[in-house]
Amino acid sequence: GEIDPKALDAAKANAKRAGVDDCIDFIKGSFVSHPLLKQQSKDGKKTNVLDDATQQSLLVVANPPYGKRLSPDETRSTIYRKLANALLSSSSSRSIDCAIIGKDLRIMREAGMPLDVAFSTKHGGLNVVAMAGSLPTKTE
């Protein structure tokens, strides 16, 4: 999700230029209210949006808020833990590949996702790291 309409329009234009716009779901809204992070009760069991999906593989690319983009009641560790919990608690057996951009490598690793550092760069004037990898499926 993205709350800045200009950033969302730029992302859509970039995806169109790259020829991948039909492969991406663009969602306007706060990262913390994304359907992926919402736990639902289904017959007394907690599920998330991944559990209801088909058995196709999934690629999750996330640039969660950090720095000034966080609200006062959010912390970087909370954001990454919510994302990790949503992805790792899915009862789906489909493969999930994940790439996450963030500012604090230690906090990203503490979230518990088995990702490796892919590269470091500057993003919005900040030093950031991208981590990527495949998450274990329920059959592993």
Image (cartoon, rainbow, N blue to C red):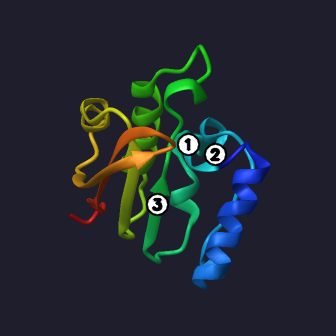
- Whether 109 is drawn above or below 97: the answer is above
Disc marking residue 34: 2
**Circle 2 crowding by C-alpha within 10 Å: few under 14, some 14–19, many from 20:** some
Residue shown at 70% from the left, 68% from the top: 12
Q: Is residue 102 left or right of residue 140?
A: right
What SS does tag 1 mark? Answer: helix
Report, in whole angstroms, how far the alpha carbon at label 1 lies from the one at label 3.
Answer: 12 Å
- Secondary structure beneath dot 3 equals strand
Question: Which residue corresponds to mark 3?
Answer: 60
Question: Of the residues shown, which amino acid type is indicated by label 3?
Answer: Val
Q: Quadrant of residue 95?
A: bottom left
On residue 24, the disc is: none
Looking at the rendered image, the disc whose residue lies closer to the viewer, 1 or 3, is 3
Q: Are marks 1 and 2 in contact (CB under 8 Å)?
A: yes
What is the distance, in whole Å, between disc 3 and disc 2 at their CAs?
A: 12 Å
How far is disc 1 from disc 2 in space, using C-alphas? Answer: 6 Å
Residue tagged 1: 37
